[in-house]
Amino acid sequence: MATTTETTLVRGACPHDCPDTCATVVEVRDGRAVGFSGQAGHPMTQGWLCAKVRPYLERVYAPDRLQYPLRRVGPKGADRWQRVSWDEAIAEITGRWRGIIAEHGAAAILPYSYSGTLGLLQLAICNTRLWNRMGASGLERSICGAAAEAAVNATLGARLAPNPSDVRHSRLVLIWGHNPASTSPHYLPFLRQAQRDGAHVVVIDPRRTLTARSADEHLRPKPATDGALALGLMHVLFAEGLHDEAWLRTHSLGWEALRERAGAFPPERVAAITGLSAETIVALARRYGTTKPALLKFADGVQRHGNGGQTARALACLPAVVGQIGVRGGGLAYSTSGYVGWDAEAVGHASECPPTPRSINMNRLGAALTGEAQDPPVKALYVFCANPVGATPNAGLIVRGLERDDLFTVVHEQFMTDTARHADLVLPATTQLEQTDLHKPYGHRHLQYNAPAIAPLAEAKSNWDVMRLLAAGMGYDEPWLRQGAEEAIDEVLNATRATSPRLAGVTLERLQAEGTVPLTITADEDVPFANGVFPTPSGKVELRSETMAVRGLDPLPDYAPPAEFSEGAGGRVSAGDDEHRGRARRDAAPSETPKLVLLTGAAHHFVTTSMANQPRLLAKEGTPFVEVNPADAAARGIVHGADVVVANGRGSCTLRAVVTEDVPSGVAVAPKGRWAKLSPDGRNVNWTTSDALGDLAGQSTFHSNLVEIRPAR
Ligand SMILES: Nc1nc2c(c(=O)[nH]1)N[C@H]1C(S)=C(S)[C@@H](COP(=O)(O)OP(=O)(O)OC[C@H]3O[C@@H](n4cnc5c(=O)[nH]c(N)nc54)[C@H](O)[C@@H]3O)O[C@H]1N2
Ligand SMILES: Nc1nc2c(c(=O)[nH]1)N[C@H]1C(S)=C(S)[C@@H](COP(=O)(O)OP(=O)(O)OC[C@H]3O[C@@H](n4cnc5c(=O)[nH]c(N)nc54)[C@H](O)[C@@H]3O)O[C@H]1N2
Ligand code: SF4
Ligand SMILES: [Mo]
């Protein structure tokens, strides 16, 4: 007789670096996850998951999931391993760390993590507590959106954004250097509805992206010229009296200085810089000045340039010029992460710890490992929730650093990534189905609790469980290094709620019972800044920003091309690394044709390198490719479907040429995320990307990347 086993449903959160922070439901039978879906009725998720996360159970139960701690037996990077016990692994790590601390100090230990999960416990708390207690080197987390975050904060005082569904009130939507059809897919149904109701959608992106395909208008400026375009629009708005002077007088600081700055950007000059026609620029300005409500939506891709900080400043100022801040259906949609900030002391307990001895910019990891970090040099690296060899610029230099015999590297991972394979010890990590967490989104305003649905696979452990073992192994006995998962989350929640009215009534019990809990946003706050409160130093929108001036930066938005475009690619390969530079230079053959700007934004089926090893998603994404315009292909003898070498002074990789009008002449596109070890020549685009820092907040500059492309022999 057949027995019916009971199915339980467990609510969770998608952990990935994505503004949608979907609410998930795991169906569990006999301790095994048998179903995975999006929660019906959730205001953002609306019952469906994106193409990349829908097959999540294939990831959870993948045959190549790491199951046991592994110790390297061959040379570094040779991928030869021996299984060890957790006790042995923890004893070895803490023993090595104690020796390094005794000889060099704890600053010689560098934790490196970023966005494998965005959870409060498994990321934020794990980023801080153990390392603060130890006095390890800090990490400057500026690989993604640091410049835009700083620019938006300086201009408006906080990163607040409209409810995504409020786009239905918009009559005009500018989607600027942002590709939500791939990177925030749950925004698209709201946008489509707005379009059906008559909103005009303009996408501003050099590439014809999935988002651009369904826009009403697609403008294709040259890369990194958006600051000039925004100032050019302001020029026309002010010159034609389309600015909202009454609003500017009441709510902003420095609008006359901005008007003067914009005066230097007449349409003809901006046309020469951006490659758009002067008529197009004037037409867009008039449309933006006369169609209301008008929403400007951007994300982080557009600011990953040497001048990205000033670009983001110009974009953040634009809605104020037309008086569209605080208007339903108008405004700036960048991020909702400013509604609540977790209480930093509860997260990291820094006040009970030694001061952080120094901070290393994560974009400079390769340089740091090969000589830039001195006194002490980095002697130990602990990587979790990140895959720097695949995702961090100037990857060739990172690999050289990881090959150092005197560097002790531990990687805590779900899979044997490009980074893990260079480790001395690899520790198996749980997936989101096997761990507890709390998620605060950056694209909407609902908290999402993630309850564990199944037991950890084999010997996998969560980040927090490993942190607790490491703390115990180091002999640290602070209670906040021993808490259970729920206890740690509860501590931060309570501390944050004590000062943040937006968490009023939000308790752990309620999160566990309801899964999804909206932030408490009062009616006068529902449209960001409608109450006229701007938490800047002046209490106004700072078009002229004192915060920027204090940092020694231009207080007004401006445009200058990124250094890469004037110095040439590879001009900034890390100082003192002549051998690497020489080798990389040889990879870049001398060429008669001008270099192309290589943009490496999001792939549709991966989140950076996460999922880029899942066979069915790889099949959908196809062979690693680079898109080249037909004119550029012809000039270089490049044939559609043939292999090409993409190279500059930093390094090279081999990709399949896709010859297409989807990219304009002068620009090439090869989406990020490919695993080097699954690529034709064992390298990905980040062998070419620059580790130079941008103009604000130590920002990465992935897209300011000049390359040569030639047929592979
Ligand atoms: N499917 C998928 N979704 C993702 C991710 C992913 O890897 N895959 N990554 C996640 C992460 S980590 C992030 S930060 C977000 C990023 O989200 P987005 O910012 O939307 O994504 P990107 O593709 O990085 O960049 C957006 C667009 O910027 C364009 N761009 C580059 N340079 C310029 C420029 O100079 N001017 C203009 N106008 N446009 C330019 C690119 O062509 C690209 O289409 O997405 C998240 N979501
Ligand atoms: N060329 C180029 N490169 C880029 C960008 C670009 O535009 N162009 N964009 C950059 C951006 S925006 C970002 S945000 C970064 C992202 O860079 P990373 O944060 O390094 O992101 P991923 O490459 O997705 O690697 C995350 C890793 O974490 C692991 N992981 C997932 N969950 C857990 C967990 O719970 N515990 C542990 N221990 N591990 C876990 C995953 O298996 C995965 O290997 O990439 C950057 N890289
Ligand atoms: S990656 Fe984004 S869209 Fe996909 S399930 Fe996760 S949160 Fe939702
Ligand atoms: Mo990112």
Image (cartoon, rainbow, N blue to C red):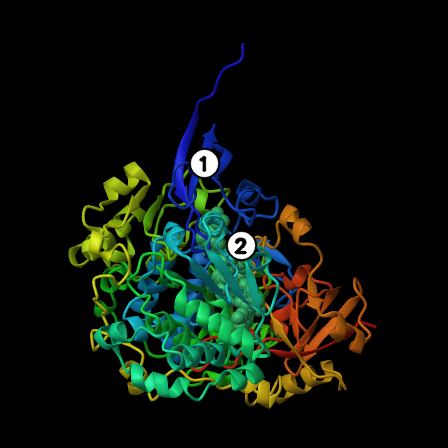
Q: Residue furthest top?
A: 1
The extreme left residue here reads 498
SS of the residue under disc 2: helix
Residue 427, image x, y percentages: 50, 55
- x, y percent for residue 671: 61, 63
Depth check, front residue: 411 or 489: 489
Identified at 55% across, 89% down, the residue is 575
Q: Is residue 88 visible?
A: no
What distance separates the C-alpha of mark 1 from that of mark 2?
A: 25 Å
Residue behind mark 1: 26
**What residue sits 23% from the left and 57% below the top?**
525
Upstream in sequence: badge 1 or badge 2 = 1
Q: Nearer the viewer, residue 509 or 206?
A: 206
The x, y position of residue 649, in whole percent, is 65, 83
Kind of residue sitting beneath label 1: Val
Residue furthest toward the front? 240
